[in-house]
Amino acid sequence: MRHRKKRNKLSRDSAHREALLTNLSKQLIEHERIQTSQAKAKAVKPEVEKLITLAKRGDLHARRQALSSLHNDKFIVHKLFDEVAPRYATRPGGYTRIVKLGPRRSDSTEMVYLELV
């Protein structure tokens, strides 16, 4: 039974899905806006929101948790804690926005921008 299982599987096994979400999170933090499919954007949005909330705490334990979640990418964690999180110090949540772009020509998948507000 799938009771209370909210995350979408995205037609991947668990390791591939975890790698995809980690890479999308890293790219969003680095570039602050990524173009992706709507399903992937909806899957990665809660992950990035949690990372920004973690970075707002700013202590050593939060930094280590972020490093673990982002596969020890020190550049991304440094940018997250020192550049991205201070922007949202007074904001209680809702750090990302999904902007619809329309369907992709090849397979009509709904494409979106996922960006930091």
Image: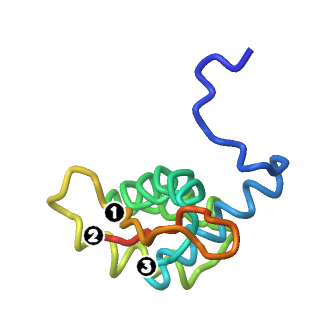
Q: Which amino acid lies under the numbered mark 2 shown in the image of this protein? A: Val
Residues at marks 2 and 1 touching, judged by CB atoms closer than 8 Å: yes
Query: At which x and y percent is residue 98?
Result: 38, 62
Which comes sooner in the sequence, label 2 or label 1?
1
- 27 versus 93 height, above or below: below
Disc 3 packing (10 Å; few <14; some 14–19; many ≥20): some
Circle 1 residue: 97
For residue 33, the mark is 3
Which comes sooner in the sequence, label 3 or label 2?
3
- 100 versus 82 height, above or below: above
Separation (CA) of disc 3 from disc 2? 9 Å
Q: Which amino acid lies under the numbered mark 1 shown in the image of this protein? A: Arg
104 to the left or right of 9: left
Residues at marks 3 and 1 touching, judged by CB atoms closer than 8 Å: no
Query: SS of the residue at dot 3?
Result: strand
Quarter of the image with the N terminus is top right
41 to the left or right of 55: right
Quarter of the image with the C terminus is bottom left
Disc 1 packing (10 Å; few <14; some 14–19; many ≥20): some
Query: At which x and y percent is residue 56?
Result: 32, 61
Separation (CA) of disc 3 from disc 1? 9 Å
Separation (CA) of disc 2 from disc 1? 6 Å
For residue 117, the mark is 2
Along the line of sight, which residue is nearer the eye, 99 or 5? 99
Along the line of sight, which residue is nearer the eye, 91 or 45? 45
Query: At which x and y percent is residue 8?
Result: 64, 41
